[in-house]
């Protein structure tokens, strides 16, 4: 391992950023130790700097937006026009039912990319640069997660835009729609920490992607996204009823087209808090142990 911090161009997406590179001359060595109880404002500042670094990275890798724009379109067209009439009686009624669920599914699948991106950064040695800086070990991971929120917003805009073009209409109000978007982003932020843990644990980005799919598919397809719970067999209903994606989908559906919201929204927030409380510390600890 090298004993000096690599010099990088500040405009490069792999660069830790000028705000962090200033601290490098005060570095005692490649594994600087951040004092316990370090200034929380410094942690926030470093996190925001690394968030910006990830936004710049998106600018240099626009291909990351391809799946976010094509995937929801494919799912909407496939399920609405192939299965909508059989499931709901008409494609229009099914579009109103399924689009809030596809919104949830799209953002959950987008969050898988957080783990893949972290694994790629570790493999490229980007985190070798970060660990030589006197910054919180939480900041690089939080910066990656927060930076990916931009990707989720693009995905959400795509779902609403295409859905509106083929006939979807919000039946509540703008404030409720914003609340639905906020709830999806909060849950996606929590989910990212599961995939962040995979990203700093596994050595191969393909392994991260494959394992993340094993997590994502049962959660999204074993939920009430595409069909009503009461139409499912009893054993599947038992899983769907406790699935956090089902609570999120029901809350978003209620906020967009009307229906019960409060109970499902509270359950979603509790699930998000529990996921974050468990997986964020595990991801940070694993990152520290690896570095």
Image (cartoon, rainbow, N blue to C red):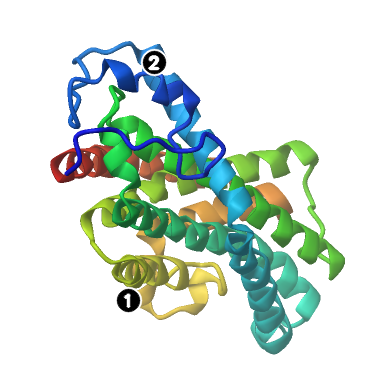
Locate residue 91, reporting x and y percent: 77, 79
Q: Nearer the viewer, mark 1 or mark 2?
A: 2
Count of numbered circles on the image: 2
251 sits to left or right of 205: right
Q: What residue is at 28 percent from the left and 66 percent from the top? A: 204
Q: In the rendered image, which residue does mark 1 sit on?
A: 235
Locate residue 67, reporting x and y percent: 60, 68
82 above or below 53?
A: below
Circle 1 residues within 10 Å: few <14, some 14–19, many ≥20: few
Viewer-side residue, 232 vs 151: 151
Locate residue 43, reporting x and y percent: 37, 20
The tag on residue 42 is 2
77 sits to left or right of 1: right
As drawn, which residue projects farthest toward the left?
289
Q: What residue is at 36 percent from the left and 14 percent from the top? A: 40
Residue 213 occupies quadrant: bottom left
Sooner in the amino-acid sequence: mark 1 or mark 2 = 2
Q: What residue is at 63 percent from the left and 49 percent from the top? A: 59
The tag on residue 207 is none
Viewer-side residue, 253 vs 140: 140
169 sits to left or right of 257: right
Viewer-side residue, 102 vs 74: 74
229 above or below 78?
A: above
**Residue 152 seen:** no
**Distance of label 1 from label 2 (alpha carbons):** 50 Å
Circle 2 residues within 10 Å: few <14, some 14–19, many ≥20: few
Locate residue 224, reporting x and y percent: 51, 67
Callout 1: SS: helix
235 above or below 219?
A: below
**Quarter of the image with the C terminus in it:** top left
136 above or below 95?
A: above
**Residue 47 seen:** yes
């Amino acid at each position: 391992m090298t004993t000096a911090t690599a010099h990088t161009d500040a405009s490069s997406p792999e660069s830790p950023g000028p705000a962090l590179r200033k601290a490098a001359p005060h570095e005692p060595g490649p594994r600087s130790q951040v004092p316990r109880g370090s200034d929380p404002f410094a942690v926030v500042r470093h996190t925001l700097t690394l968030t910006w670094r990830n936004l710049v990275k998106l600018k240099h890798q626009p291909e990351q937006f391809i799946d976010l724009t094509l995937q929801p379109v494919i799912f909407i067209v496939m399920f609405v026009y192939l299965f909508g009439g059989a499931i709901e009686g008409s494609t229009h009624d099914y579009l109103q039912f399924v689009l809030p669920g596809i919104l949830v599914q799209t953002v959950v699948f987008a969050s898988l990319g957080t783990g893949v991106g972290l694994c790629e950064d570790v493999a490229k040695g980007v985190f070798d640069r970060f660990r030589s800086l006197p910054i919180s070990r939480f900041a690089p991971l939080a910066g990656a997660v927060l930076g990916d929120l931009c990707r989720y917003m693009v995905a959400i805009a795509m779902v609403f835009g295409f859905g509106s073009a083929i006939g979807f209409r919000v039946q509540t109000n703008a404030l409720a729609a914003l609340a639905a978007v906020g709830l999806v982003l909060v849950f996606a932020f929590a989910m990212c920490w599961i995939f962040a843990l995979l990203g700093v644990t596994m050595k191969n980005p393909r392994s991260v992607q494959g394992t993340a799919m094993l997590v994502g598919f049962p959660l999204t397809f074993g939920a009430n996204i595409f069909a009503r719970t009461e139409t499912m067999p009893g054993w599947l209903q038992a899983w769907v009823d406790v699935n956090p994606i089902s609570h999120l989908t029901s809350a978003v559906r209620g906020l967009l087209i009307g229906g019960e919201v409060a109970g499902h929204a509270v359950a979603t927030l509790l699930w998000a808090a529990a996921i974050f409380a468990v997986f964020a510390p595990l991801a940070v600890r694993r990152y520290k142990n690896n570095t």
